[in-house]
Amino acid sequence: MKPTIIRNRQFYTATNHIRSKQLGATLSKDLREKYGKRNTRVVKGDTIRVMRGEFKGIDGKVTQISTEKSGVAVEGIKREKLKGGNVDIYIHTSNVMITGLNLDDKWRQSRLEGQKAKVATEPPKETPKESPKEVLKPKEVQMAPLFWGITRKDSRFVVTVRPGGHPKHVAIPTAVFVRDTLKLVTTLREAKSVIYGGKIKVDGITRRSLHHGIGLMDVVELVGIPDVYRLVPRDSMVLRPIKINESEKTKKLVKVTRKTTTRGSKTQIGFHDGRSIISDAKVNVGDTCIMQIPEGKLLDVIKLEKGCQVIVTRGINAGHIGKVVEIKEGTFVLPRRALVNIGEREIEIPVDLVMAVGKDKPVIQLE
């Protein structure tokens, strides 16, 4: 469908409150200088001048306004009926210019004067010098997840997560991780200096984006700081950074989330952090692989089966480590579930919310 047809359809099928906003006309030069506006909505009692059409050059007061016809009736512009009498001729507001305003409505007057004061006092805005890729809509602080560690009343907006390997609701943007989670810097400007300077490594790869999402089991290094961090669920929180040994920064646990067969009967395996590799490893969806980073090489496979150790990744039990007692297959109504022994209690939880971390004990540092 042609764009002109779409535009006309939107115009003629608009609701009354939208068509009322479309009844705007340009202001004369004097009114523009006085109020700091180029146009405003025409109201009954305004003095206008017809700028185009059959009645060009005629001045008069507005006597009627019609949202249905998108026009105004002007005093002195009428048409004679065949049966006698006169009828108003409605002129589209795009063909008129307002030369005098009806200020009986004090709300209208205050809006016009307020606009003038705003234009006079507001300093020119500077355009932020960031690359177009970094311009994302900010998230309100009240909507930010609790595991980000943000103080609620410090500011209104915060950097959001760019869609990537980890889902947005279970990831921390790099700028927030440095400033609010680790509290290594105090302002966003300092966080930008650190990130744009290439001092942040996630899984051994330098990340220079404020919005890059850091998620489950990611390993974070900071140039100039000896500490190495891994993000794990802990204390009922989805993500918490823990310090790990230098020898473990090249190992990462990744959960198998999908498995497909590609051309040539090759198996493609997809993981929870967005990675996908082609491998002959015998794994099933739900199993966990030990991966060498940043090379992406698979070192070993941890099967999700009876007797293995798992960690709960989400929910009220997030961060608890337990032993699998039984794996219950899913039904038409219920998902596949795992019966996990945590301390002195057993819980039944969907396998989507657990991650295998070892056979007898966790193979990497999780606490």
Image: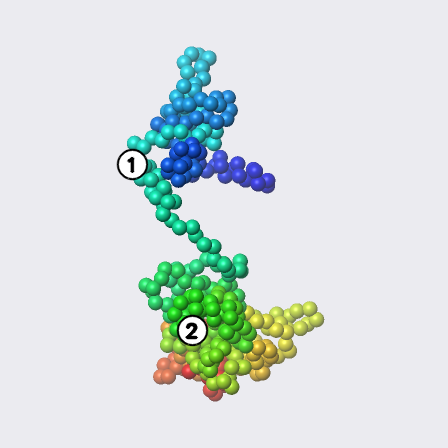
Q: Quadrant of residue 155?
A: bottom left
Q: Quadrant of residue 21?
A: top left
Instruction: Locate the C terminus and report the quarter of the image it occupies.
Output: bottom left
Q: Nearer the viewer, residue 356 or 304?
A: 356
Instruction: Locate the N terminus and report the quarter of the image it occupies.
Output: top right
Instruction: Kindly identify the residue that appears in the image at 47 percent across and 57 percent down.
Output: 128
Instruction: Kindly identify the residue that appears in the image at 53 percent across and 60 percent down.
Output: 131
- Outermost bottom residue: 360
Which SS class for mark 1? Answer: helix
Residue 286 visible, this angle: no
Q: CA distance from mark 2 to mark 1?
A: 55 Å
Compared with 128, 63 (above or below) is above
Q: Which residue carries the number 1 mark?
A: 106
Residue type (three-letter) at the residue carrying disc 2: Leu
Label number found at residue 230? none
Q: Which residue carries the number 2 mark?
A: 239
Compared with 78, 138 (above or below) is below
Q: Position of residue 260 (x, y in %)?
A: 61, 70
Q: Nearer the viewer, residue 367 or 154?
A: 154
Q: Position of residue 361 (x, y in %)?
A: 46, 87
Instruction: Kindly identify the residue that appears in the image at 44 percent across and 12 percent down.
Output: 83
Whichever of callouts 2 and 1 sits on the residue coming sooner in the sequence is: 1
Instruction: Kindly identify the residue that appears in the image at 41 percent across and 16 percent down.
Output: 86
State which mark lies toward you, 2 or 1.
1
